Image (cartoon, rainbow, N blue to C red):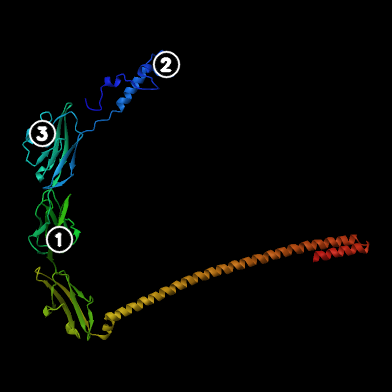
Amino acid sequence: MRPGHQGLGAVLEPKLFSTKRGQSQQQIMEPPSALLPTCVPWQGLLLTASLLTIWNIPAAAEPTIELVPPAVLEGKTLLLLAHNLPDDLLAYHWFKGKRSIDKDLIIMYQIKSQETKQGKLYSGRETLYPNGSLMLQNVTLKQSGIYHLNIHSADGQKSVFAEVFVYPLLSKPSIRSNRTTAVEGQDTVELICEPPFRKTTYLWHLNGKKLHVDDHVILSRGNATLTLLKVSRHFRGRYECEAKNPLSAFHSEPFTLDVFYGPDTPKIFPPYKYFEEGRSMWLSCQTVSHPKAHYSWNVNGEPWNSRQELSIHQVGISNNGLYTCLVTNPATGRNNSKVKEVIIVDQPSRSFLLSPPLVACVVAEILAGLAILGGLAYFAFFKKLDNRENHKRIQHRKKKRKNRNRAKEQRKARSNSILSKDKLTLSTQGHKLHGNSPHEVDNITYSVQNINT
């Protein structure tokens, strides 16, 4: 029986436990008729105690294997530490692999006879401990993989598995290449990071940045080999390879690859083709090339000079023609050219019209005139718009003044009409009052004067 586990009979066994002073189990286990109505029968108490005892039994921890350390470098020591083995252990067996077969047996131990047996995979660098743990010394890469501990106990057999990771002890790599220089679009370059390591990740860097992989970049042999197909100028620079695993990492010394390219199609400056007679003419040819290109000039098919620039102090009609810039790159064996037509203007009027500085001045004056015209048009438009608004305001004021005068005349006409009626009324009353007292006449006169006022 495992410690902490009790049979149901033992759990249900009658036990004495104190309640109040001097009371015993027999006192509590009286017949139900002797208990108070609020008490629980003794069978219920025993069942409750049994259930609480079962619930409080600690669960047995499952056997496990801990790797110390979790990963190990080649040549180091690794401990497979066994935990939570049962107390009623009879024997245990260590195997390399997932199966419990003789050809995979490393070592075994019988508890009762204290007998140790070495299997076919025992190398003499394994140490078995009484607690079931296994130590591997001076490990090799071949010892990576699945290990399992087969446990024999009174309850039967159980297997516990663990995976061992052994990594190579890295050193500083170096780069080997089939060439140190290459021609753009022509040569293929192969870079190899050495020495080769198993279970190792290889990374490539160009000019301090991670190398971008595209259709012209091939990685092989676990990324240890870098192949550049028909190299371009963008592959020129310093290469480094990095060898790394979870436990170590090393960078190689830089390897410099020089890529020759060009010459690209040249350009001739200045871009215009008209030059004034009697003035100096200067032409410059420029191209992109590595290494620098060699320059030469032909004029109308005849060699002129072997420089990047061409200069004529005073040009004449005889200098009309086709000027060709020739560029050559000896490293790539390639050449390129650019042709420019030159026209010498011999008439002053034509020269005046076609001279680039004068043309620039004329264009500037035209643009300035257009700007002035635009400003005038803008001013005239808004001036006209402002006049329209002023006219509307004046008409509106006239209309308001006319309406006020009309209203005033209407009020005056109504006042005159009322006054005429009052005078007529007073006249009639005056006739009626003829012969009355002077005081009454004065009152009427005063009233009329008030109305007139």
Q: Position of residue 60 (x, y in %)?
A: 24, 31
Q: Position of residue 56 (x, y in %)?
A: 30, 28
Q: Distance from label 3 to label 1 (Cα)? A: 53 Å
Q: Secondary structure at mark 1?
A: strand
Say whether marks 3 and 2 touch (CB < 8 Å): no
Q: Select label 3 or label 1 by which is in front.
A: 3
Instruction: Measuring from the top left, give residue 168's x and y in whole percent.
Output: 12, 49
Q: CA distance from mark 3 to mark 2?
A: 63 Å
Q: Amino acid at mark 2?
A: Leu
Alpha-carbon neighbours of circle 2 within 10 Å: few (<14), some, or many (≥20)? some
Nearest to viewer (mark 2 / mark 1) = 2
Q: Is residue 151 above or below residue 383?
A: above
Mark linked to residue 35: 2
Total number of numbered discs in the rendering: 3
186 relative position to 15: left or right: left
Q: Amino acid at mark 3?
A: Met
Q: Position of residue 373 (x, y in %)?
A: 41, 75
Q: Residues within 10 Å of mark 1 (few under 14, many from 20)?
A: many
Tag shown at residue 239: 1
Callout 3: helix, strand or loop?
strand
Q: Residue at x 18, y 41 (%)?
A: 67
Label 3 sits on residue: 108
Q: Quadrant of residue 311?
A: bottom left
